[in-house]
Image (cartoon, coloured by chain):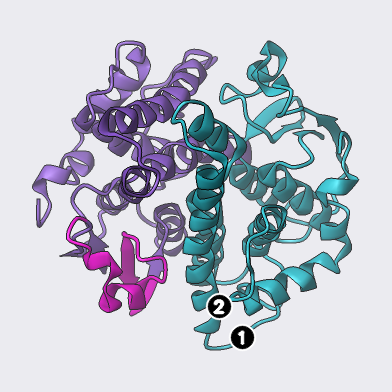
Chain colours: A purple, B cyan
Amino acid sequence: MILYDYCRSSAAYRVRIALNLKSLAYEQRAVNLVSGEHREDAHVQRNEQALVPVLEDNGMQLSQSLAICEYLDEAYPETYSLLLGTPLERANQRAFALAVACDIHPVNNLRVLQYLVGEMGVDAEKKMQWYHHWIHTTFRALEAKLQKRKTPSAFCCAEQVTIADICLVPQVFNANRFAVDMTNYPLIKAINARCLEMEAFAKAHPDLQPGA
Amino acid sequence: MILYDYCRSSAAYRVRIALNLKSLAYEQRAVNLVSGEHREDAHVQRNEQALVPVLEDNGMQLSQSLAICEYLDEAYPETYSLLLGTPLERANQRAFALAVACDIHPVNNLRVLQYLVGEMGVDAEKKMQWYHHWIHTTFRALEAKLQKRKTPSAFCCAEQVTIADICLVPQVFNANRFAVDMTNYPLIKAINARCLEMEAFAKAHPDLQPGA
């Protein structure tokens, strides 16, 4: 498999964790989002949305990190499962993942922040306020969700890592990069720390990727 | 089942379509996003994120529209399938759905537009520019994806409706409401029109919901 990747992309970071958890070998090709390589023809041919990650498997190109994770579970069911248990449990794992993947990440990603500053005329301070606002809005809800669990587990939704943790960890990395105050999120912090001790997460860390 | 719903929420509209396609009976309870009912305790108890939709099934409350759709497919496999075919085909259906659900809807939804105006000081004209920009960015990519299909099908990803179409139709409704020029999206328009002819879509239309 080939993963078209960028070291600091949260969405690509999720797929690296998923591939590592499932012990699937992959080659990485860096697509530099800062220099604009993702908007070049070669990458748009892979993904009309001009986003990373793109996973190439058997010559087919897949986009959207959560669709890729679901694909990996369906195409390689003999390896680690990213979703576990009953339909209800799986729905909770997916809902947690989607809260990050829909309600934080797309509102705070590089292209949106660039548009805020470049086209909306928002200054650097207001841009940071925007970033922090959307992180806190959803982290508050997720921390409350974790607090309310009837049987607290080591990870977000189970005693083992699921797609929920795969989305949480890159978002916490990003929050730390933007100096978000994490004081009110003790459960999120504890789960994040537990994940980072695992090799699948450690190896996926942005600082260790090509182009970092 | 009880669906906590709002007539003009794109995410709730998706779940109404999914429930109708699967011929599952549900009761609707309107949660008025304009008057702020979603931020009241009663609703936050159901969903810490204070968003709609929430689906209650067997007393359990589920959030995030795409997690709900996946749940319905897993819990009620004997009815219409919202995802079809091989892992690769299903990945394409999910990726299409996620392009709308991650890359358009959360950036353009009511709370984000309100924050742009209220906290970022963006004026009405710039707000509309923002809205149109993010619709066009992803619709251009999705139209190109539809054009590139090796075997064009009646719907986004297959000869029958999948989760991709369930996400597309509410987004086109929203685009029309904001007077987005759809001239460059003939395939999106044709698929949307085909869907609207189906009873499952027609019955889910915002104008026909409680509180509309």
Q: Nearer the viewer, residue A28 or B11?
A: B11
Q: Where's the N terminus of chain B, which quadrant? A: top right
Q: Position of residue A199 (x, y in %)?
A: 17, 40
Identify the mark at residue B73; answer none if there is no mark: none
Question: In the rendered view, would you say A65 is above or below A108?
Answer: below
Instruction: Assign a secondary structure to mark 1.
Output: loop
Question: In the rendered view, would you say B169 is above or below A154?
Answer: below
Asked if residue B33 lies in the magenta stretch, the reply is: no
Toward which corner of the image does residue B93 lie, by quadrant?
Answer: bottom right
Residue A172 visible (yes or no) = no
Image point (47%, 26%), residue name: B119
On screen, residue A3 versus residue B37, left or right, reads left
Q: Position of residue A161 (x, y in %)?
A: 36, 35
Toward which corner of the image does residue A173 lie, by quadrant?
Answer: top left
**Mark 1 or 2, closer to the camera:** 2
Image point (10%, 47%), residue name: A208
On screen, residue A205 versus residue B65, left or right, reads left
Q: Where's the C terminus of chain B, which quadrant? A: top right
- The amino acid pointed to by label 2 is Leu
Q: Residues within 10 Å of mark 2 (few under 14, many from 20)?
A: many
Q: In this figure, which residue is indicated by the disc labeled 2?
A: B146
- The amino acid pointed to by label 1 is Pro
Instruction: Assign a secondary structure to mark 2.
Output: helix
Image point (32%, 24%), residue name: A191
On screen, residue B45 versus residue A56, left or right, reads right
Q: Position of residue A169 (x, y in %)?
A: 30, 34
Q: In this figure, which residue is indicated by the disc labeled 1?
A: B152
- The numbered mark, 1 or 2, whose residue comes first in the sequence reads 2
Q: Nearer the viewer, residue B168 or A202?
A: B168
Which range is magenta?
Answer: A34-61
